[in-house]
Image: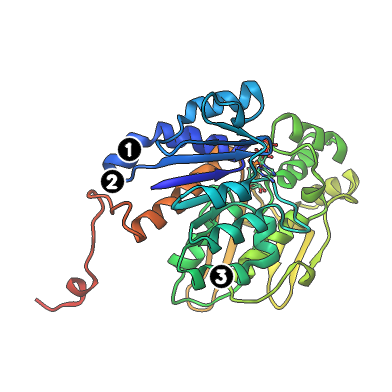
Amino acid sequence: MNMIIIGFGNVGQSLAEMLELRAPELRERYGLKVNVVAIVDRGGAALSEAGISLSEAVKAKRFRGSVSTMRGLGRPQLSALEVLEEVDGDIVIEVTSTSLETGEPGLTHIKKAISSKKHVVTTSKGALAQMLPDLIELANKNDVSLMFSGAVGGAMPILDFAKMCLRGEKVESLRGVLNGTTNYILWRMAERRIGLSQAVREAQELGYAEENVSYDLNGLDTACKLVILANWVINRRVSLKDVETRGIEELSLEEVLKAKEEGFAVRLIGSIKENLRVRPERVSLRDPLCVDSSLNAVVFTCRYSGQHVLIGRGAGGKETASAVIRDVLTIAQGFGWASSPKDVLNVNPKSVWATP
Ligand SMILES: NC(=O)c1ccc[n+]([C@@H]2O[C@H](COP(=O)([O-])OP(=O)(O)OC[C@H]3O[C@@H](n4cnc5c(N)ncnc54)[C@H](OP(=O)(O)O)[C@@H]3O)[C@@H](O)[C@H]2O)c1
C-alpha cells in the first residue's frame, strides 16, 4: 500500500516512528506492507517511489526543519496539492495543523485527495467540523474511504465505538469531556488551588497544551468534536454555528474552589441532546465525567441498552497516530491490502444461528 503523509508535526512524526517500529507486526499479523512514497510539510516534500526511510525523514525534520532537506529525495517548496497531482498513492494521511474556523489547509487537501481517488485518513478536526457530510458524499461518489477516528478522542475509539459497537441502537444523547487540555487545567486549579493562567502555563510546559491554547479555552475545540459526533453518530446535519459554546476563560479560581467545597468538580462538558452545547458545568465526584488530569470521557445514552461510558487518553502524538493506524488497517482490510489476523476468532454468523 503506497502512502502519502501530509503534515509532519507531532502526529505525522509519531505515525512514521510507529509505522517503522510496527512494520514486522503489521506484516506478520495482517499481511500489510506500507510503503511511504511522499511526505509533505510546509517547507516542501520528500518523494520516493521505492519508499522513504521513515527514521531518516524524522531525522531530517528534527535536525534540519523540513523533510524537503532529505538528500536525493527532497523537493523544497513542492506543495501538498502538487504532490497529490504528481504522486501515485493509494492512501493519504492528512495530519496538518488545522484552522477550526475555516478547516484549512486540510479541507482542500482532503477534497483533492478524494477527487483523485485516494483513500483518506485524517485527524483534521477543522475540516471535518466544517464539511463532514459533503466530504462523506464526495468520498462515496469517488468510491474511496474517508476515516477520521483520531479526530475525536485521540486514541480513544469514540467514533468507532459509537458506529460499530452501538449499531442497531439509537444514541439519544451524549455528554463528554472531549478536551484533555482544559480538563487538566480545571483539575489542576482545584487540586493545587492555582489560577487559570498558572494552570495553562503548566499544561503548556507538560506538552498538554499547544502554544496557542485559545481553541481549547474558548471551547471551540470541544464544539468541533461535538459537530463531528452529531453528524457521524446521531445523523444530525449540524455545523459549528449550531453549537452554543462557552469556554473556561472567564472561570475564576473562587468558582472552582467553591464547587469543590460543595462536593463537585468543574468540567468543560460538551453535550448533544435537543441542542448542542459546550460549557463549564459542575459535576458530582461520582459522575463518570469527573475524570482527572488530561483524560477524556464520554457517556452515550442509548434508547435500548442504557448508558455506556468510555474513558481514555484523548490526545498526544503517539495516541493519535495509533488511531490513524487503526483506520489504515480498516481501509487496507476492506480493499485487499491486508487480511484479518489469523489469531482472531472469525465467527461465521450463519454457523452461530444454525441448529445442529
Ligand atoms: N496532537 C494531538 O494530540 C492531536 C490529537 C487529535 C487531533 N490532532 C489534530 O491532528 C493534526 C496534526 O496535529 P499535530 O499535533 O501533529 O500538529 P503539529 O505538530 O502542529 O504539526 C502540523 C504539521 O502540519 C504541517 N502543515 C501545516 N500546514 C501545511 C500545509 N499547508 N502543507 C503541508 N504541511 C502543512 C506543519 O508543517 P511544518 O512542520 O513545516 O510547520 C506540521 O508539520 C491537527 O489537525 C490536530 O488538530 C492532534
Residue at point 63%, 70% (across, down): 230
Q: CA distance from mark 1 to mark 3?
A: 33 Å
Of residues 299 and 121, which is closer to you in this image? 121
Secondary structure beneath label 1: helix
Q: Mark 1 belongs to which amino acid? A: Glu
Task: Please say whether residue 312 is visible from this viewpoint.
Answer: no
* Farthest-out residue, left: 356
Of mark 2 and mark 3, the one earlier in the sequence is: 2
Asked whether the beta carbons under mark 2 and mark 3 sit within 8 Å of each other, the answer is no
Asked whether the beta carbons under mark 1 and mark 3 sit within 8 Å of each other, the answer is no
Q: Which mark is residue 31?
A: 2
Of mark 2 and mark 1, the one earlier in the sequence is: 1
Disc 2: residue Cβ within 8 A of ligand 1's nearest atom: no
Q: Mark 3 belongs to which amino acid? A: Leu
In this picture, is 312 found above or below 277?
Answer: above
Residue 35 placement (x, y as % from top left): 40, 40
In this picture, is 65 found above or below 157?
Answer: above
Label 1 sits on residue: 25
Residue at point 69%, 50% (across, down): 179
Task: Tell me which colouring the rendered structure shows.
Answer: rainbow
Of mark 1 and mark 3, the one earlier in the sequence is: 1
Secondary structure beneath label 2: loop
Q: CA distance from mark 2 to mark 1?
A: 9 Å
Q: Mark 2 belongs to which amino acid? A: Gly
Residue 156 placement (x, y as % from top left): 53, 51
Q: CA distance from mark 2 to mark 3?
A: 29 Å
Q: Which mark is residue 138?
A: 3
